[in-house]
Amino acid sequence: MTEFLYPFLERGETDLATVLADVESSTTRKGADVITLRGSIDLQEVASCAATVRERLERGGRLIAFGNGGSSTDAQDAAADCLALGWPAVALTNDAATVTAVGNDVGFENVFARQLIPLARPDDVALAISTSGSSPNIVAGLEEAHRRKLLTCAVTGYDGGLLRELPWLDHLFVVESDYVPRLQEAHATVYHLLLEAVGPR
């Protein structure tokens, strides 16, 4: 794990000045990488998405966000930020009992779709966050959201994965990187910009 983050530590460098210089260089390089990724975000698409999201929220809809692993915490952050703006929101990974019950009883690929069946209403907004864009439960969740007439939005990495192949997906933001730590930082920028553009209630 250390080698992945700081390969110079595995080389046995013990000189403090050298180690500190390597840490500084590594941090600077990582910062530059995420700045480049953030610069690739399509701001016009963010504005377009924000306008349609706000329209749904003003009609009484809610933001329903979901993701796996680190992306689940991003979904929770997006929902919390939406609530802070005065709009109703929920993250589908907040309830561990529900997630594990659905995963155990009907399969992990259904943990989001199954929750949407009783929760979703046509004016709601589904926001899926996925580093790969190909997680079966993310695709299934968006498919269920589409069936129920929700506005469907997704933030992903790599080349967009399977989400890029969904012709009915309303808004898709692809951070084209295969380095998960950096692309997740850019994902946070996407949904923060989006919610800032949506604005307060």
Image: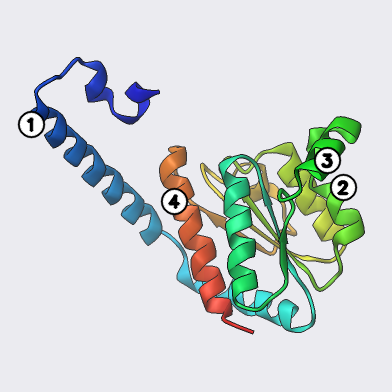
Quickly name the residue at label 1: 17
Q: Tell me if label 2 and label 3 are in contact, CB under 8 Å.
A: yes
Residue at numbered disc 4:
185
Q: What amino acid is found at the position of numbered circle 4 in the picture?
A: Glu
**Pointer 3 residue:** 110
Which residue in the structure is indicated by mark 2? 114
Label 1 or label 4, whichever lies nearer to me, is 1
Looking at the image, tell me whether mark 1 or mark 4 is earlier in sequence order: 1
- Mark yes or no: residue 183 visible: yes
What is the quadrant of the C terminus in the image?
bottom right
Which quadrant would residue 21 be assigned to in this image?
top left
Tell me the quarter of the image containing the N terminus.
top left
Q: Are marks 4 and 3 in contact (CB under 8 Å)?
A: no
Looking at the rendered structure, the secondary structure element under dot 3 is helix
Name the N-terminal-most of marks 3 and 1. 1
Q: Are marks 3 and 1 in contact (CB under 8 Å)?
A: no
